[in-house]
Image (cartoon, grey):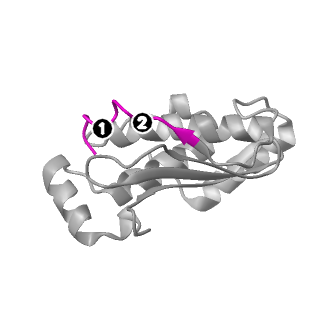
Amino acid sequence: MKFSRLAIVIMVLVLSLVGGECFAGGMHDGYYAAEAAGYDGEGWKDFITIYVSNNFVVNVEYNARNSSGFIRSWDLDYQRRIKAETGMYPGEYLRTYTGELLIRQDPSTVLVMAGSERSHSAFQLLASAAIAQARAGDKSIALVDLTGTETENR
């Protein structure tokens, strides 16, 4: 399911106006981040950054970088290889997972996309950690052990 940025903004505004309870309740405004505790077998370290405003996650960046800081979604050779192996390229599921978190506000309810099971597991763990940081008002980067998610598909 894909939603435009405008649709996401409208949904967040409507939810905030009606005072609806959501998974993200009790969070402090600001930026919060979580990243993998180490690099995976292909040399990538997944990370997520969320921005919280008025108890809602209103911006999400989920990606991975290598040891030189190069971003996974910028690596066209990697994108092509993964597309050939799984039928899906990373940029596709990155946008979908982040958009779903904006809508659902609960990483455990973000649905997995076939071909990106490993990234889905990593996304859920990292998003949950970032939300926990927001609830605590802790601006440090949460380090998350993603061991076990590495054996699944990218």
Q: Which residue is mark 1?
A: 150
Q: Residues within 10 Å of mark 2 (few under 14, many from 20)?
A: many
Classify 78 as above or below 97. Answer: below
Residue in the picture at 17% in, 60% down: 81
Query: Quadrant of the rendered structure where residue 72 is?
Result: bottom left
- Left or right for 29, reference 113: right
- Left or right for 23, reference 74: right
Q: Main secondary structure of the magenta part?
A: loop
Distance of label 2 from label 1 (alpha carbons): 7 Å
**Which quadrant: the N terminus?**
top left
Please name the amino acid that badge 2 sits on.
Leu
Q: Are marks 2 and 1 in contact (CB under 8 Å)?
A: yes
| Residue 101, numbered label | none
Classify 62 as above or below 114. Answer: below
Please provide the residue range marked out in magenta.
Answer: 143-154
Residue in the picture at 56% in, 41% down: 143
Q: Secondary structure at mark 2?
A: loop
- Left or right for 48, reference 65: right
Residue 116: x %, y % from top left: 31, 42
Residue in the picture at 41% in, 52% down: 45
Q: Residues within 10 Å of mark 1 (few under 14, many from 20)?
A: some
Residue in the picture at 26% in, 63% down: 79
Residue 14: x %, y % from top left: 77, 45
**Which quadrant: the C terminus?**
top left
Please name the amino acid that badge 1 sits on.
Glu
Q: Which residue is mark 2?
A: 146
Q: Nearer the viewer, residue 135 or 80?
A: 135
Specify whether residue 15 is painted magenta.
no
